[in-house]
Image: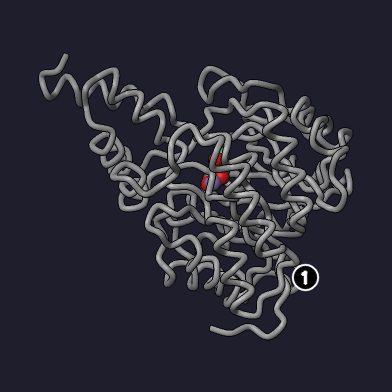
Amino acid sequence: MTFTSKKITVHDMTLRDGMHPKRHQMTLTQMTTIAQGLDAAGVPLIEVTHGDGLGGSSVNYGFPAHSDEQYLSAVIPLMKQAKVSALLLPGIGTIDHLQMARELGVHTIRVATHCTEADVSQQHIRYARKLDMDTVGFLMMAHMTSPEKLLEQALLMESYGANCIYCTDSAGYMLPEDVKARIGLLREKLQPDTELGFHGHHNLAMGVANSLVAVEYGANRIDAAAAGLGAGAGNTPMEVFIAVCARSGIETGVDVFKIQDVAEDLVVPMMDFPIRIDRDSLTLGYAGVYGSFLLFAKRAEQQYGVPARDILVEMGRRGMVGGQEDMIEDTALTMARARGLR
Ligand SMILES: C[C@H](O)CC(=O)C(=O)O
Ligand SMILES: [Mn+2]
C-alpha cells in the first residue's frame, strides 16, 4: 500500500480513552505533561475528558480525580499548536457541558452514540454547529450493524450538521475487510466535503492495519494513543501508526521520534498495568464487546469468582452496548448462581 502525499489528521486518545485503564484517575500533572509532549511532537488534535466523555463522572462510569473543567482548563492554555477536543455522549453529557467546553476553548466536539442511535445526537450536533465548533458524529460499536445501516446513521448525523463522521471500532472486533466495507461506503455516499474518521482498538492487534485500510478507503482522521493507552488492549498505538505512515507516504505532521519518546518516557511509566493483548482484552475483540467493559468484568471476577473472560463472552452473546455497565455485575451474579458459586 503506498500513498502519494496523502495528508491526514491524527487525533490523540491518550488523555481520554486512556482514562479507562487509569480508572479516570490521571493527575493534572500527568495530563499537562503528556499534552505538552504530544503538542511538541506535532499532534494536531488531543482529546481531554473523563473516559466516558463530558459529564461521565458518576457511580455508573466512575468518579475521576478531577473534573472535566479542571482538566480542560489546565491543558488548553498550554497548547502551542494542538487543538483540544472533547467527547460527549448524549444522556451523559448535556448542552450545558457543551457550552462549558466551548467557553474553555475546546475546538472539536465529538458527539458519540451507539451505531444505530444517531437520532439522539441531533440537538448536540446542531448546538455545536451553532457554536461554530468542528463537529464530529462518532458512531460507536460500528461492527454491530451493516455498512448500509451505518450509512443511514451517518447520513442522519451529517444532516444535523456534523462536518466529520467516525466509524468507531469500540470492541476492536473489525478485520480489514469490515473497515473497507464501512469506510468505503461512507466515503462514496457522504458529501465529498464531509470528513471521515476511524477509531480503532487493538484487541485483535488490528489497530494499525485497520487504520491504514481506513486511510486507503477515504478516512482522513485517525485516532490513536501514545503507547496505545486506552480501553481494552488499547487504541491504535500512535507511535507505531506514525512510523507506518512515514513509511507509506502518509503525511501526519507528527515527528516519528518525538512521539516515540512521549510513549516511552511519559505514558508507559504511568500505566497502572501493561496495556497488552491478554486473554481478557483479546476476548473483547473476539467476542465483539465494548472496550471499557474490561475493568468492570475484572472487578466482577474478583467479587463473584466467575472468570472475566466468561463474563465478557456472555456480554458479547447478549449484545450488550455502552451504557449497560450495570449489567456486567448482574450477569456475573447470574453466572455465579448458575455455577453454584453463590
Ligand atoms: C465512551 C467510549 O469510550 C468511546 C470510545 O472511545 C469507543 O467507543 O471506543
Ligand atoms: Mn475507544
How many numbered marks does the figure carry? 1
The percent position of residue 234, horizontal first and vertical second, equals 48, 47
**Which residue sits at x=50%, y=64%?**
208
Q: Nearer the viewer, residue 172 or 95?
A: 172
Picture layout, residue 78 above or below residue 100: below
Q: Residue 83 versus residue 325: which sits nearer the camera? A: 83
Q: x, y percentage for residue 167? A: 56, 58
Left or right of residue 242, residue 288 in this image:
left
Amino acid carrying label 1: it is Asp
In the picture, measured across the screen, residue 14 lies left or right of residue 317, that is right
Residue 213: give x, y in percent of width and height.
Answer: 52, 73
- Residue 43 visible, this angle: yes
The residue where tag 1 is placed is 193
* Residue at the image point whose x is 36% and y is 49% from the top: 277
Q: Tell which residue pokes out farthest to the left in this image.
A: 340
Q: Position of residue 231 (x, y in %)?
A: 49, 41
At 51% from the left and 36% from the top, the residue drawn is 271
Q: Quadrant of residue 5?
A: bottom right
Rendered-image quadrant of the C terminus: top left
Considering only vertical position in the picture, is 226 above or below 89?
below
Q: Answer few, some or many: residues within 10 Å of disc 1's Cα (few below 14, many 20 plus, some between 14 and 19).
A: few
In the depicted structure, whether residue 250 falls above or below residue 22: below
Q: Nearer the viewer, residue 326 or 298?
A: 298
Give the residue displayed 40% in from the left and 36% down from the top: 294
**SS category of the residue bearing label 1:** loop
Q: Quadrant of residue 334?
A: top left
**Mark 1 vs ligand 1: CB below 8 Å:** no
Q: Is residue 114 visible?
A: no
